[in-house]
């Protein structure tokens, strides 16, 4: 797909970010057709040195800096700040993840930028937010997963709190930032004025646990870990079978009846303990044991086929790398590839959007500068 066919073609983004979250926002904008200039320090972005390294960068660096060109600047140096100013004068979006105090120190806060560039959209991502006593604290994904309660509700019931296996706050905050600046572009079309968009890992984590916060107010019961299960539905989660593991999701009473009929255990559907979702949640442990006894006699593929025919959400448990040969991944063409300096071609999942049936591809090689 050529750049001119993408929705953000003609938009220029100056991406003064580092690490994972904010650079991911720039990658999203680049995927959507924007010209993204990623500014790194002269020593290179820290993400270039995240394991495993490849060529002049790393696997993580490639994922969050695709579809960008690269420029080395040191904003502490007057000459380099002058080059940055020249870029901003001819750009639409400016992305940063410096702490608010540093933005002010270098004259890159939104108030200063608005005075110099009235049409510029400033997207600022931080750890704890743009305001409040903690606005200048450092933070990483796992730290904010812990602060906002995500780690506390992740893991097995009898285990310790754990970080979610995916950097959900980095990717989530980056996505929110991209959504925010795209909304600001639309607003600018109507008003002619730029604006400041801010988000953070903290705010993203707070948003992600909305259900648990609301549930606590209703029940006054502390949040608990449920492993692969769910506090609102039953049966729900990962089960072992004769051959491997599957994940099953039952979101309503009708679906539970279908499940029982498909597995030839229809008597459970009318049992007082299991006839309603509320009762199933209350008796989840007992129900899980009964289902695991049935699943232990059947192969995973057989169960998936039976439940698929009954219109029930069920699938096998895979590793992330299995997507490289996954039938649906191939048919949806979710995998894209990039040429990386000093390495060769690398495949990874692209943006989960298609435009007129075409998914945006990696248009630019990933190089040192």
Image (cartoon, helix red, strand yellow):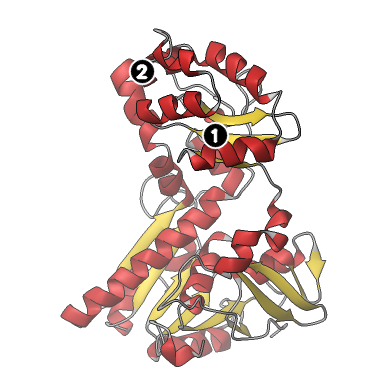
Please provide percent x and percent y for residue 80. 57, 86
Residue placed most toward the observer, 212 or 256: 256
Q: Is residue 160 above or below residue 56?
A: above
Above or below: residue 40 compared with residue 79: above
For the question of whether residue 170 can be seen, the reply is yes
For disc 2, the neighbor class at 10 Å (few under 14, some 14 to 19, many from 20) is some
The residue positioned farthest toward the left in the image shown: 191
Image: 167 above or below 259: below
Instruction: Pick the quarter of the image with the C terminus.
Output: bottom right
Mark 1 is surrounded, within 10 Å at the Cα level, by few (under 14), some (14 to 19) or many (20 or more) other residues, namely many
Q: Nearer the viewer, residue 253 or 108?
A: 253
Rendered residue at 58%/70% (across/down): 333
- Residue tagged 2: 276
- Estimate the x, y position of residue 181 in percent, counting from the top left: 36, 70
Coordinates of residue 242 in the picture (x, y in percent): 74, 29
Q: Which mark is residue 128?
A: none
Q: Which mark is residue 248?
A: 1
């Amino acid at each position: 797909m050529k750049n001119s066919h993408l929705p953000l073609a003609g938009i220029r983004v100056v991406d003064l970010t580092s690490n994972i979250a904010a650079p991911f926002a720039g990658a999203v904008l680049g995927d959507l057709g924007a010209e993204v200039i990623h500014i790194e320090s002269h020593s290179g972005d820290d993400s270039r040195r995240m394991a495993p390294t490849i060529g002049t960068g790393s696997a993580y660096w490639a994922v969050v800096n695709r579809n960008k060109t690269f420029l080395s600047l040191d904003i502490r140096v007057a000459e380099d700040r002058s080059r940055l100013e020249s870029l901003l004068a001819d750009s639409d979006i400016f992305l940063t993840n410096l702490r608010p105090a540093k933005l002010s120190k270098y004259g890159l806060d939104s108030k200063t930028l608005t005075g110099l560039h009235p049409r510029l959209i400033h997207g600022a991502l931080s750890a704890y937010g743009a305001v409040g006593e903690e606005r200048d604290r450092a933070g990483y994904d796992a730290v904010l997963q812990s602060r906002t309660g995500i780690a506390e509700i992740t893991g097995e019931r009898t285990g310790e709190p754990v970080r979610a296996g995916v950097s959900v706050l980095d990717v989530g905050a980056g996505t929110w930032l991209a959504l925010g600046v795209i909304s600001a572009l639309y607003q600018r079309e109507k008003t002619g004025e730029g604006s400041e968009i801010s988000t953070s890992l903290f705010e993203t984590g707070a948003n992600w646990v909305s259900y648990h916060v609301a549930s606590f107010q209703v029940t006054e019961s502390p949040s608990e870990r449920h492993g692969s299960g769910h506090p609102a539905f039953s049966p729900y989660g990962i089960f072992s079978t004769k051959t491997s593991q599957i994940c099953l999701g039952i979101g309503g009473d009708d679906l539970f009846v279908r499940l029982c009929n498909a597995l030839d255990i229809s008597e459970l559907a009318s049992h007082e303990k299991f006839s309603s979702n509320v009762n199933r949640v209350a008796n989840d442990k007992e129900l899980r044991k009964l289902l695991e006894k049935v699943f232990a006699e059947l192969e995973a593929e057989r169960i998936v086929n039976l439940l698929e025919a009954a219109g029930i959400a069920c699938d096998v448990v895979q590793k992330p790398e299995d997507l490289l040969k996954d039938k649906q991944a191939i048919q949806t063409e979710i995998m894209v590839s990039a040429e990386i300096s000093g390495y060769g071609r690398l495949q990874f999942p692209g943006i989960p959007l298609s435009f007129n049936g075409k998914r945006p591809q990696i248009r630019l090689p990933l190089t040192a500068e």
